[in-house]
Image (tube, rainbow, N blue to C red):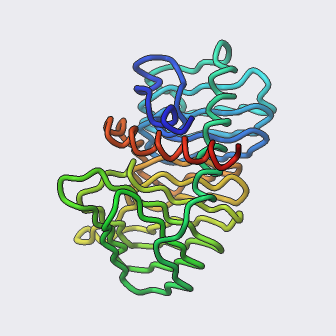
Amino acid sequence: ALAAILSSASLSAQTSITSSVDYGVLVLNDGVSDIKDSAISGDILYSDNSQNVIEDISPLTGSVFVHTNVDKFDAKPVYAPTGGTFTSGFDDKIDQANIDAMAMAMLADTQTATASYGKIDKTDFSYSSSSSLTVLDIEELIQDENTFSLTGRAGEDDQFIIRIDKKLNFRKSLVELNNLDASDVLWYFGTGGDTDIFHAKPDPDADYGFSGVVLNPDGQIRLGGEGDFNGTLIGGEIKIGSGANFESIPEPSSSALILLGSMALLARRRRS
């Protein structure tokens, strides 16, 4: 099942949903979102019984897909998604995106940690992979004008799962990826810890930015400030604002699908 999570082209191009990580934002079932005062490139999905406000988004390069059973969808000026707004015909696809996201969470939960860390507090961090999948457990990650560097093996299709136990506080810092794409890094918050990515107004000479797929089903995801975000946000409570510059990830490579497909098969075997 997880192979399907990374298998489809963008919603804007194919008007279909077969994956939970090839668009920009997924507000999960029963979730809440407040998206304002930002630039967004990527599709947005609002799920069953979710409550959502979106305003002052310019530009919004992508499409917005709204479940027919959404509890609240309040779109205020400036709101003009280039791909349009779809309020019917996509319920099954949005429901499947939720199922895929929960499958990804289960998969992240079942992997054995490659390395474990306590609180990483305002210090640079780097890790180089030695295998196709690296799982890092971090109790708490505080970055303030720091660099968090991940390196994959040259010529390989390595991936990282970063499991945060308590919280992530990421300010005026950089996620540096070497031999990796944003789609190769999953930031997973299985215990509902808060995700706070806020760059404030960046120094024009500084390089601030966050990359990866953020999956936080039960905690709050906050993205703000004028730094760049390259990836995907999947959560039950999502707030984007304060001039955030959001760009969704590209479609992953076929080799990444093969790896994640084998992980999904392992997960199914463990359940049987």
Nearest to the observer: residue 38 or residue 221: 221
Q: From the viewer's perspective, is residue 103 above or below residue 44?
A: below
Count of residue discs? 0
The x, y position of residue 121, in whole percent, is 50, 87
Residue at 68 percent across and 46 percent down: it is: 33
Which residue sits at x=54%, y=48%? 233
In the depicted view, which residue is nearer to us: 84 or 157?
157
Q: Is 100 on the left or on the right of 67, as rendered?
A: left
Q: Is residue 227 above or below residue 119?
A: above
Residue 32 x, y percent position in the rendering: 73, 46
Q: Quadrant of residue 17?
A: top right
The location of residue 27, given as percent across then percent down, is 65, 41
* Residue extending farthest top: 89
Q: Is residue 13 left or right of residue 108?
A: left
Left or right, residue 125 beside residue 219 = left
266 horizontally vs 166: left or right: left
Residue farthest along the left direction in this orientation: 155
In which quadrant will I find the N terminus?
Answer: top right
Residue 51 position within the rendered picture, expressed as x and y whole percent measured from the top left: 76, 39
Q: In what quadrant of the picture does the C terminus appear?
A: top right
What residue sits 29% from the left and 55% below the top?
180
Q: Residue at x 45, y 44 (%)?
A: 260
Please, is residue 56 above or below residue 18 in the view?
below
